[in-house]
Image (tube, rainbow, N blue to C red):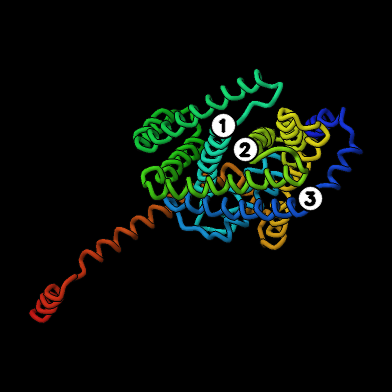
Amino acid sequence: MLFLFAVFIFWFFGRNLDWQEISQSLRRANAFYLISAMLIISLGYLLRAIRWQTLLVPITQTSLKELFATTTVGYAAVFLVGRIGEIVRPMWLPMRDRRVRPSAALITIGVERIFDLAALICFFSVNLIWFNSPAGHEAEFGYVKFIGNLMLVGVAIGFIALYIYQKYAAQFIAWFERATDKKFFPKRIQKIFLSLLRQLSKSLRVLKDWREVTAVVFWTILLWFSIAVPTWLVILAFDLPLNFSASLFVMGWAAIGSLVPTPGGAAGAFHAATAGGLIFLNINPNDAAATSIAMHLVYFAPAVFFGLYYFLHGDMSVARFKSLLDSEHAVEEIEEGERNDTVRRRHGDVEQKTEDQRPKTEDQIANRKSQIENV
């Protein structure tokens, strides 16, 4: 069904275009700029893995190599099957790194998406402050600017809400447990939600430590620059009369198009939204279409390349992947993860108690030896 929807959008997008002119425009594109854009996009996937590792620090230790592999496999899945492929990342990582529970991976990806959305809105909205209105689109630009400011306010409110939840997570979780402790509410579903809420609370501990917050924000800014710069390079490849500020504007439109859950990396919707942003900036529709096609390939081709490589060389168990998607097994994974967390906490307490009982100074050591000799 989604595939047919993608075909319809792509047909609607290209029904009035001159595909011969688009083909010529694609052949004339500067290959150096396009290759450079793909290399920077590849770096962006590494930055995503580093940021994911930073978000997982309050919960568990992880391997950067496995995070990079999982990130590329996940985005390859998004390209192949649409947004439903997002479920691959939180299910795939626990199979490659047993220290990470599926619920922890899922929650940190959710937090990651919050930071991504906030960064995208900030890039788009702040850029509108000095962005000049395209000739002939002054009225429409006023609406775009208003929506951008509204989204910026929404980001601020969202982070305040997350901070409040993190601060009072124990009370909120206790309230939810009491509210769902009813006969009609399935116990397994309750356990899953309670575990997700606890994992969210752990993941949001980064908001307590300004060093961790700074680290996440730093990697997020670098990540979105690694998307904005390739966007500009693609625009340069087609010799369009637009500056870097305009590329941030186009990136915002492209991101909106990529949210449509169609296969092929939001095929059709991505192209229509990106081309729409370029046409809004008074770019010829055929050049805008050619640019959107190239930009789509630049954004997703590296992920498909790396993702297929890791998928074919990962020695992964398809049976285990399917079992992780099963609701009953998900509960077992959560319960096992919570038991492991409890064991680690108790082990840490025992080690700390043993450490506290050890003599720390030479006098204490001498006293201990004396006590042993007296005995």
Question: Is any atom of residue 2 visible in this view?
Answer: no
Amino acid carrying label 3: it is: Asn
Residue drawn 77% across the image and 40% down it:
291
Q: Nearer the viewer, mark 3 or mark 1?
A: 1
Drawn side of residue 301 relative to residue 355, left or right: right
For marks 3 and 2 on the same chain, the one whose residue lies earlier in the sequence: 3
| Precedes in sequence: disc 1 or disc 2 | 1
Q: Nearer the viewer, residue 356 or 246?
A: 246
Q: CA distance from mark 3 to mark 2?
A: 21 Å
Q: CA distance from mark 3 to mark 1?
A: 29 Å
Q: Residues within 10 Å of mark 3 (few under 14, many from 20)?
A: some
- Tell me whether circle 3 and circle 1 mark residues in contact (CB < 8 Å): no
Q: Is residue 364 above or below residue 189?
A: below
Which element type, helix, strand or loop, lies under badge 1? loop
Q: Earlier in the sequence, mark 3 or mark 1?
A: 3
Which x, y percent locates residue 33? 73, 51
Q: Is residue 120 visible?
A: yes
The residue carrying mark 1 is 130
> For the residue labelled by badge 2, is the local secondary structure a helix, a strand or a loop?
helix
Locate residue 163: give its quadrant: top left
Q: Residues within 10 Å of mark 2 (few under 14, many from 20)?
A: some
Vertical side of 321 occupied by 119: above or below: above
The dot on residue 245 is 2
Q: Residue at x 51, y 45 (%)?
A: 108
Farthest left residue in view: 374
Judged from this view, the residue extending furthest toward the right is 20
Disc 3 element: loop
- Amino acid type, residue under disc 2 in the picture: Ser
Q: Are marks 1 and 2 in contact (CB under 8 Å)?
A: yes
User: Hey, what amino acid is under mark 1?
Assistant: Trp
Q: Which mark is residue 197?
A: none
